[in-house]
Image (cartoon, rainbow, N blue to C red):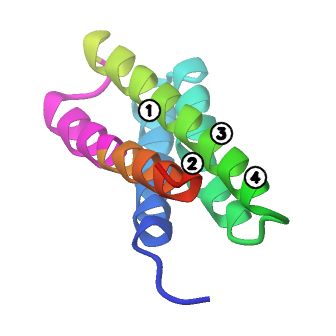
């Protein structure tokens, strides 16, 4: 399989999420929100990877759509962490921007796949 910008960006994003989750647990002793963030933030890339071997175009669109939903939920957790002052604005801006970029790329990919 060739180089995929979406695949690479989602993997890099997942690594950042893992590191943030680890920091939230070790430095802030925050376990619930960090676990949700970890679950959703890493699922984005996992679903993109799963879509690479979709059984059909419909299956591809379905997996990418689930990835999009996970990305949107990740945005929610990041906003909640910022507003509850568990992460600083700089960390939020970086990760929120990365996630919004992934969401936009997923929307574009899904639309292209649907022929819209």
Q: What residue is pinned by disc 4?
A: 58
**Rendering coords of residue 29 (x, y %):** 49, 24
SS for dot 4: helix
Rounded to the nearest angstrom, the CA distance separating label 4 from label 1 is: 38 Å
Residue reaching furthest top? 84
Query: Which circle's residue, 2 or 4, is located before the other in the chain?
Result: 2
Viewer-closest of 11 and 20: 11
Q: Is residue 7 above or below residue 41?
A: below
Q: Residues within 10 Å of mark 4 (few under 14, many from 20)?
A: few
**Rendering coords of residue 67 (x, y %):** 60, 44
Q: Which mark is residue 43?
A: none
Is 90 magenta? The answer is yes
Query: Which circle's residue, 4 or 1, is located before the other in the chain?
Result: 1
**Rendering coords of residue 71 (x, y %):** 49, 38
Compared across the picture, whether 33 is left or right of 39 comes to left
Rounded to the nearest angstrom, the CA distance separating label 4 from label 3 is: 12 Å
Q: Nearer the viewer, mark 3 or mark 1?
A: 3
Q: What residue is pinned by disc 1?
A: 24
Viewer-closest of 56 and 103: 56
Q: What residue is pinned by disc 2?
A: 44
Q: Nearer the viewer, mark 4 or mark 1?
A: 4
Q: Are marks 4 and 3 in contact (CB under 8 Å)?
A: no
Q: Are marks 3 and 1 in contact (CB under 8 Å)?
A: no
SS for dot 1: helix
Query: Which circle's residue, 2 or 1, is located before the other in the chain?
Result: 1
Q: Which mark is residue 66?
A: 3
């Amino acid at each position: 399989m060739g180089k995929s910008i979406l695949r690479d960006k989602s993997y890099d994003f997942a690594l950042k999420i893992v590191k943030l989750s680890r920091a939230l647990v070790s430095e802030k002793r925050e376990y619930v929100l960090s676990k949700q963030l970890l679950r959703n933030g890493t699922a984005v890339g996992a679903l993109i990877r799963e879509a690479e071997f979709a059984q059909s175009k419909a299956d591809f669109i379905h997996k990418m759509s689930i990835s999009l939903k996970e990305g949107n939920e990740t945005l929610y957790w990041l906003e909640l962490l910022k507003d509850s002052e568990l992460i600083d604005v700089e960390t939020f801006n970086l990760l929120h921007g990365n996630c919004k970029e992934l969401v936009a790329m997923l929307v574009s990919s899904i639309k292209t796949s649907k022929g819209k």
